[in-house]
Every structure is written in C-alpha cells, then in structure tokens.
Amino acid sequence: MARPNPSTRETVQRPLDPPQNAGTEVPGGVYLCQVSETVSCGACCGLYNVADPSREAITAMLARRTTLFSRIPREIEAILDFGARTGDQDGRQRPYPDFHHCPYLGLVGGNRTRVGCLLHPLGQGNRGVDWRGLSHYGGMACRVYFCPATRRLEARYKQVLRAAWTDDWHAFGLMASERYLVAALLHLLEARLGRLLDPAVIAGAPAQRQAMGRLLRIKLDWPHGRGGHLCHDFFADRRRPSPGARGDKAPDGAYDVVLGELETDPGAAAARAALDRRLAAAARDLR
C-alpha cells in the first residue's frame, strides 16, 4: 500500500468538533454513527470489509490498532506511516477490493467499548486536533457524509434500530447500513401488528427491546442464505450493487426484498416459512 503524500492532504483542523457533524443537518434528525458508549457504526468506513468479519476477529483487530495508535506521536508523518502499515496488515483478502477499509478505525470511548475513528478530535491523545484530513476520504467527507440508510430510511425505523441495541456495536453496524433489508423487514412487522412501530415504547420496555433485537439479528443468524460474506458494498449506485432487490420503499413483495437481501432464493418455501415464524414471534412479543 503506497503511503499518501502529505502535501496532497487537507490541512489538519484544530477546533474541537462536537460528535455529531457540526453545521450539518442529520437526515431525519436521527443519528446512527455514534449512538451510545457501547453502540456505534463503522460500516461506511469498511469495518466489515475484512477476511473475517466476526465480532471476535474485528474486536481483536480494532483493539490491536487502538493500542498501537496510542503509542505514536501525533505528527503527520507518524500517522500516515501507521495508516500505511495497518492497511498493509489488515487490508489483505478484502471481499470488496474497491470498497475502502479505513486503517484508522479503532475502539473509542473511555473504556474502548465501541467502534469509532482514531483520528477524531475527541479521540484519546488527540487533544482536540482533528486529524481526519489524513484519511483516505479526507476530513470533509468524514464530517458531512451520511450513509444511504441514514439518508433514506424513515425516521422511526432508524429510531427502532437505536432502541434495539444497548451494547452490541458489531450487530448494530451490520444492520444499520442495510436500508433495504431494514425497511422491508420492519414494513412486514408493522403489517403483521396492524400499526406503526413506536420506538419510544420499544426503548422503554426491555422485553420489547430484546424482541426487536432478536428479529434484527437476522443477518447474523439466518440459516437459509447462500453463505456469503457478512459485508457487502452497500453504497447505492450502479457500480456498487447490494446482493438483493432494489427499491427505496418496501413494496407489497417485501418478502422477496428481505429474502433477496439475505441472499436467499425468494421461492424457497422453507425460507419463507422461517421468515414468517420469525416475524410472528416478534409481533407476539411486541403486543
């Protein structure tokens, strides 16, 4: 991996940024990047675009990086060298070679309990300096970009995602970036309930929160797919298709959307029956 030329990078910014993209309106008013001390998302930074995307492997990778980064001086050359070495080590065998995996992803927070950016001004040891201008996409993209799910999912669905997890950034990030799957799955659940989901009720009722979490873990424990990689390049343009069906809103054929996004044959009777059982269990526990 060639080391970037510092002369081509943005000027490092010294003002202390607030955590939620200063001066940028969050689409729908619901923020998915950093939710709590234990829940966050790094999917658009290529978090899961690694050979082994399991929680155990990714946690070990991020913990190693975070420790190493804490030992380097906060100087441009040292930070760029860290990125080059980390990219060479962790960037092998990516399932999507043209989907950038950021070598500056690490564990953040006082107890290193969630994924985040090691270059962020609030990061440990950065002393308020914003080093994100040294990253692949540059500091401006890091400050103002929002993923397709944040931009396109209905606000209540994003609030449901935030309510469903209290301590699992790995599972949260896998689903928070799946706008088609989430929209279709929750559309089917609302149709079964005969009402719209109420994120506030879910957040305040542990049994409902757990039920929603079980439903939304479908990407992690679905047994009927083709066994593909957990990651897919989710940026919604022609060059980067997801494995499933297209469409911003869940259509009447929402079953097909869910199964398609899970890389499952929509005509498989056993898979459709399994999805029905899963939705029925969630609806029962949410009543």
Image (tube, rainbow, N blue to C red):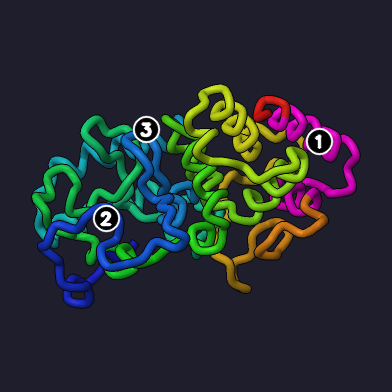
Is 253 in front, or is 191?
A: 191
Q: Residues within 10 Å of mark 1 (few under 14, many from 20)?
A: some
Residue at 42% over, 30% down: 167
Circle count: 3
Residue of label 2: 83
Residue at 83% over, 48% down: 265
- Is residue 119 within the magenta segment? no
Circle 3: element type: helix
Could you tell me how far apart the alpha carbons at marks 3 and 1 are, in whole angstroms?
A: 36 Å
Residue of label 3: 60
Residue 52 visible to the viewer: no
The amino acid type, in three-letter code, at marker 1 is Asp
The amino acid type, in three-letter code, at marker 3 is Ala
Could you tell me how far apart the alpha carbons at marks 2 and 3 are, in whole angstroms?
A: 17 Å
Q: Main secondary structure of the magenta part?
A: helix
Q: Residues within 10 Å of mark 2 (few under 14, many from 20)?
A: many
Residue at 16% over, 41% down: 70
- The magenta region covers 255-283
